[in-house]
Amino acid sequence: MEDKLKMLVLQIKDGNKDAFTEFYRLTVRYVYSIVYAYLLSNEDTEDVVQNTYLKLYVVRKRINPEKSILAYMKRIAINYAFKQMRQKKEIVREKTFFSDDEGTKELVQEALKKLDEKDRIVLALHYLGNASVKEISVLVNEKEGSVKSRLFRARKKLKEVINNETI
């Protein structure tokens, strides 16, 4: 997939709008899931995703096709998500993508609400964004060891919260 994205990036740099549409189609679910992990609101997430792709289109000529476009998109999206979070005191929470089962979605959603924001973000980046510990450490500006510890503690807290909810 990364090779296809690199090819599309080259076409986008040349102004090919069809390539941009195809790039969007291939990456929007990935970007959406990462942003949603931060904002927990469909409406806010859609705004941030839209801003992310607008920003990408504006800076398209400066994109280095040799570097990971997904990492670049993730960084843009997270920056916009943080901006949105700072602007909004109350975060509206609707649903999560951990399961297709509605009951499980609700259970995980409620459990995630009870986690610390940093823990929730690390879990989401790791499981929804498929980010490595190294990538997460760069994205959240923490040392790799701290991210590993936070990920371990967050999983443990999530398990405890879910177990308490189902009892």
Image (cartoon, rainbow, N blue to C red):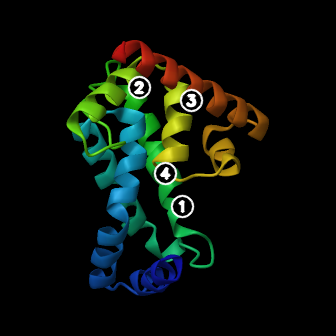
Above or below, 49 against 23 in this view is: above
Q: Badge 3 is on which residue?
A: 155
Q: Where is residue 129 in the image (x, y as percent from the top left)?
A: 49, 51
Closer to the camera, 57 or 158? 158
Tell me, for residue 112, which label it has, or none.
2
Q: Position of residue 130 (x, y in %)?
A: 53, 53
Residue at left 26%, top 25%?
A: 92
Q: Distance between the residues labelled 1 and 4?
A: 13 Å
- The answer to which of marks 1 and 3 sits earlier in the sequence is 1
- The answer to which of marks 2 and 4 sits earlier in the sequence is 2
Three-letter amino acid code of the residue under disc 1:
Tyr
Three-letter amino acid code of the residue under disc 2:
Leu
Q: How far apart are marks 2 and 3 (CA)?
A: 10 Å
Q: Distance between the residues labelled 2 and 1?
A: 26 Å
Direction from residue 116 to residue 146 in the image, left or right: right
Residue at left 51%, top 34%?
A: 121
Three-letter amino acid code of the residue under disc 4:
Gly
SS at mark 1? helix
Q: Position of residue 24 (x, y in %)?
A: 32, 69
- The answer to which of marks 3 and 4 sits earlier in the sequence is 4
- The answer to which of marks 2 and 3 sits earlier in the sequence is 2
Three-letter amino acid code of the residue under disc 3:
Arg
Q: Badge 4 is on which residue?
A: 129
Q: Distance between the residues labelled 1 and 3?
A: 27 Å
Q: Which of marks 2 and 3 is in front?
A: 3
Residue 97 is drawn in which quadrant?
A: top left
Q: Where is residue 114 in the image (x, y as percent from the top left)?
A: 42, 16
Q: Work out whether residue 68 can be spotted.
A: yes
Q: Nearer the viewer, mark 1 or mark 3?
A: 3
Direction from residue 94 to residue 111 in the image, left or right: right
Evaluate if marks 2 and 3 touch, with contact meaning CB atoms under 8 Å apart. no
